[in-house]
Image (cartoon, grey):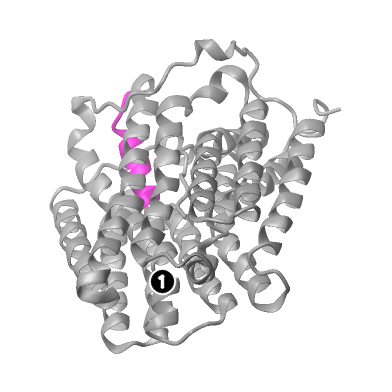
Amino acid sequence: MHGDLRGWPACLTAGAVFAVCMAGTTLPTPLYPLYQDKFGFSELTVTVVYAVYAAGVIGTLLLAGNASDAVGRRPVLLWGMLFAAASAACFLAATALGWLYAGRLLSGLSAGLFTGAATAYVIELAPKAGGSRATFVATAANMGGLGCGPLLAGVLAQYAAWPLYLPFIVHLGLVAVCSAVILLWLPETVRDRRPLHTVRPQRPALPPSVRAVFGPAAIASFVGFALFGVFTAVSPAFLAESLDVHNHALTGLVVALAFFSSTAGQLAVGWVGVTRSLPLGCAALLVGLGLLAGALVWDLLALVVLSAVVGGAGQGLSFRAAMSAVAGATEPERRAAVISALFVVAYFGISVPVIGVGLLVEPIGLEGAGLVFIACMAFLVSTAGFYLLRHPVAATGPAAAGRQEQPDTH
């Protein structure tokens, strides 16, 4: 049955499966204040819980990021769905902080498996002439799913019963449906499959030809994902404590806007071009950081929203351009290892600065910690932007630019 249907229906269905999995990784974002009230932990603990997710993604990317090339896309995606279901079960069973750590780690394992396998699957299921559009389907499913997670959880927590349970019950139902779709309808696209024991860990590597491009591209990626990390881990507390915003749906919408804007920014790379997108993305990130600083100083919700939109668009521009530039400067046989290195930098951006903010909250307050973070990130992205203006990256061909994997952040 599953071998009969290919083309755009299968491609879009796989994209929907991708989005459901990624939504689960950001589902807890607007719920952290509720967990803080329930278990009585600090803002530092929130950031550590969030960083556990990034650790799971990084470990999975390095150890099993290429597993679907060997055993097939569908088995890896089914394992990813299994980890997503186990993560939701941990949150449903949560009676202490340890359950949250376990749930976030399992969510990271799920996202690590999906990041490469689902992106490749969506592209491979599309018609051969539709590679560019299929890449955007994968990108939109990834970032769109990440944005739908906090929006769904926020709306259910605000307007329905069981705020700490219903979002995960709904996600479990969606995971079950998507698992059945993968198993019964979507075809396998890897023809020459090998046993699991043939899979070897991927070691990030930087050949000399890519080092000049990789440095500024990695800095831009680091700052973009650090901004996402702060929005998803810290912004709920800032909205509640400093702006007196206790509407979970509004909190989820603010976080979702950053991811939706990233999707728009990534789409714009096709019009702007890789060479201009990297410095332009850095400039937008700098403006987004400035708007966030203004929100912290003057306690204005409008600036938080603008920061999410502008910073998210800058992240999308800079990251997709960074992926294209790095891939275009790398020999095909080493491209996967180099892209893995960029993934690792991006996920360190999600976790390390966020933990730093958490450490500074107690001695200098949430606003002071946020301003220190903004100053550090502004210096990094300004340095990368000026370098890119003086040393523009070479534009890549469509094959390099159109088939890059896009990692998630939450």
Residue type at numbered disc 1: Ser
Q: Is residue 17 above or below residue 339?
A: below
Q: Is residue 292 above or below residue 341?
A: below
Q: Is residue 184 above or below residue 201?
A: below
- Residues in magenta? 319-331
Which residue is most to the right?
A: 1
Judged left or right of residue 169, residue 307 is: left
| Helix, strand or loop under label 1 | helix
Q: Main secondary structure of the magenta part?
A: helix
Observer-nearest residue: 228 or 367?
A: 367
Residue at image position (51%, 63%) is 29
Residue 267 picture location, percent across and down = 48, 56
**Which residue is the site of mark 1?**
235
Residue at image position (26%, 42%) is 394
**Corner quadrant of residue 130:** top right
**Corner quadrant of residue 330:** top left
Judged left or right of residue 315, residue 108 is: right
Observer-nearest residue: 162 or 368?
A: 162
